[in-house]
Image (cartoon, rainbow, N blue to C red):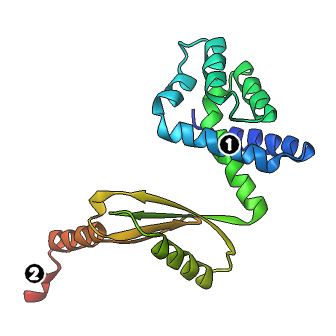
Amino acid sequence: MNNPRLAGRYAKSLIDLAAELNQVDDVCTDMKFVQSICKSNPDFVLVLRSPVIKPATKEKIIESITTGRVNNTTAAFIRLLVRKGRETNLPEIANAYIDQFNVSRGIHQLKITTAAPISDELKNEIISKVKASTSFQHIEVETDIKEELIGGYMLEMEGSLIDASILKDLKDIKKQFMDNQYIHKLR
């Protein structure tokens, strides 16, 4: 089901079409809407990927969700996907479109995962430190909360991860005890 090559090609085609129609920003907003639906509602993704549900029914379901919320270009593109049997790839196509849009605009994604919600002040401080240590000028921030981190944070950007969480520290300590590094030094 996950086909990044296909998703990239469809996203590129949609960006080219949107550029011709001068709607790149509007379509990006629509793709972010589709992405948020897919992330927040796994049942919607299951409907898209179900071989049992007929394409006409899928098209009606998608239209009921997107009518009045996406522009005509995006709606026509989604209808085309359904008619071509590619609706299963809609979540990946939305992600690929957003990624390609961000690359074209020089926008970098930053994901901050913490054990508790962080304040806007702290978020802005992190952004300023990232901007100071890199050449990135435009940064979009996504925050996530995972209580199992106990404390600290995880920072993901450009395929790299900085894990400064208490959970990681505890795992490192556990690994040291499991390796028994100190017993060999006593002998």
Three-letter code, disc 2: Ile
Dot 1 and dot 2 residues touching (CB under 8 Å)? no
User: Which numbered marker is on residue 31?
Assistant: 1
**Residue 186 is drawn in which quadrant?**
bottom left
Residue 38 % position (x, y): 54, 37
Residue 70, percent across and down? 72, 35
Residue farthest toward the bottom in the current orientation of the protein: 186
Q: In this view, does 68 lie above or below 97?
A: above
**Residue 51 locus on image (x, y percent):** 55, 16
Task: Locate residue 91 relative to residue 77 in the image: left or right.
Answer: left
Q: How many marks?
A: 2
Mark 1 residue type: Met
Left or right of 137, for residue 114? left
Residue 42 marker: none
Q: Is residue 57 visible?
A: yes
Pointer 2 residue: 183
In the figure, is residue 170 to the left or right of 70? Answer: left
Quadrant of the image containing the C terminus: bottom left
Query: What residue is shown at x 80% (from left), y 31% (from top)?
Result: 72
Tell which tag, 1 or 2, sits nearer the viewer.
Answer: 1
Q: Residue furthest left?
A: 187
Quarter holding the N terminus? top right
Is 110 or 69 nearer to us in this picture?
69
Residue name at image x 27 percent, y 71 percent: 166
Dividing the picture into quarters, in which one does residue 74 lie?
A: top right
**Secondary structure under the numbered disc 1 in the rendered image:** helix
Sequence-earlier tag: 1 or 2: 1
